[in-house]
Image (cartoon, grey):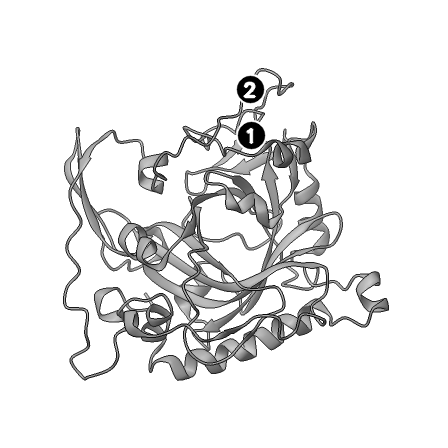
Amino acid sequence: MPETRADDTNAAAKGPDESVEGSGAGSKHGIQEKTSPDSKRLKTDDGKTQKTIEETISSEPKEKPRAKKEEEDNTRGNGEQSAEEETGTAEEPGAREDEVPSSILEKGVIYFFFRGRVGIDEPSNVNEIQRSFMVLRPLNPGAKLGEGTIEDAANLRLIAVPKKVFPRSGKDRWIAFVEKKDASLKELKDEFLSSSEYETKTMGTRHTNAATPAAEGIYAITTTGRESHLAYMITLPSELGEVQTELGLKQKGSFILSTRNPAYDAPRNVALPEGPAYSKEVQDEFASRRWAPTQPHHLNYVNTQFLLIGESSGIESATEPQKEDEKEGKEKPEEELEKLEDEDTHRMEKLREGDSAAIFADLGALATDYPKLPTTF
């Protein structure tokens, strides 16, 4: 029976007693929360180093991590300019400032990655994937994209999805969290993209595989009043393959986003050792609610947890025009996304030959140091 928009809406509206996907693949867990937030104390920002997803939710106790392998020769043998030497010139702030609708709370470039299970460098099927990730790279709200790379504004967010795949419909609803915020390109390379080794008490030396790119495109966090959405359009690869389809990605897709109030206990099996250190102003936005429509500034806190709910209708609901924007003659949200996607397509085509080379060049890295973007297993 085909999924309907009603399925997605009902999923978003389900209360805390309904099931939500946790960190275990294919398992569903009931949300068990306290009835009052009074007993929970919010932690303050103490300047601790941000933890990786392996340090945060792995069941294995770790000892001292080994130093990362030094980056190898950083220049291309064919004489091409290295990624680190390129100057970010693509973003043109304010070029469409008067056209962008108010329902677009944030827009930018999005990268999808996955990492193979321990000991598996090249997954041969989706079951050999450990978990998936999104990297959000916000742009100026009124910006357009020209040619070249985007300047490193040290504003990258690494979103960890403790699942093998992304949600496809309203029946798929599980929790993601912010692993890193305000990350620079160097930090992303050193602490996420690259492979590494670490010591455990029970298993000895373990190897973390390098992250594999699955897709690149543009995104917008939108509001329809009642809900927040993350809508995206994929630029690379130009045609989705088996890998992208199995991961649950679409050429045009979206998720409903709902941020968890850290004053209440987390759903079973997805609790993090530490919660987000929200400011009083942000915490007050929740009032007594356990969940609230996600705002972009929620994602500027490490360990923010939010529901990621699939939408079978694609981007239709996420880009629904708002009456006030129509009265002011603003663009429709989908039109702004299409313009940004078209600009990104031209930008990436000229950046490098090959999807992998273009993606890693945009992230200030050399594709030869990392796995290629696959379309088939």
- Image quadrant where one finds the N terminus: bottom right
Q: Relative to 9, is 112 on the left or the right?
A: left
**Upstream in sequence: badge 1 or badge 2:** 2
Residue beneath disc 2? 40
- Marker disc for residue 80: none
> What's the amino acid at mark 2?
Lys
At x 55%, y 79%, the residue is 342
Please say if 246 is above or below 175: below
Q: Relative to 19, is 351 on the left or the right?
A: left
Q: In which quarter of the image is residue 369?
A: bottom left
Disc 2, SS: loop
Q: Quadrant of residue 141?
A: bottom right
Q: Disc 1 and disc 2: Cα gap in Å?
A: 8 Å
> What's the amino acid at mark 1?
Pro
**Which of the pair 244/264 is nearer the observer?**
264
**Which of the pair 10/230 is nearer the observer?**
230
Residue beneath disc 1? 262
At x 52%, y 42%, the residue is 174
Q: Position of residue 271 (x, y in %)?
A: 46, 30
At x 35%, y 59%, the residue is 185
Q: Farthest residue toward the right?
A: 327
Q: Position of residue 262 (x, y in %)?
A: 55, 30
Q: Farthest residue toward the top?
A: 39
Please say if 253 is above or below 181: below
- Answer whether labels 1 and 2 touch (C-beta < 8 Å): yes
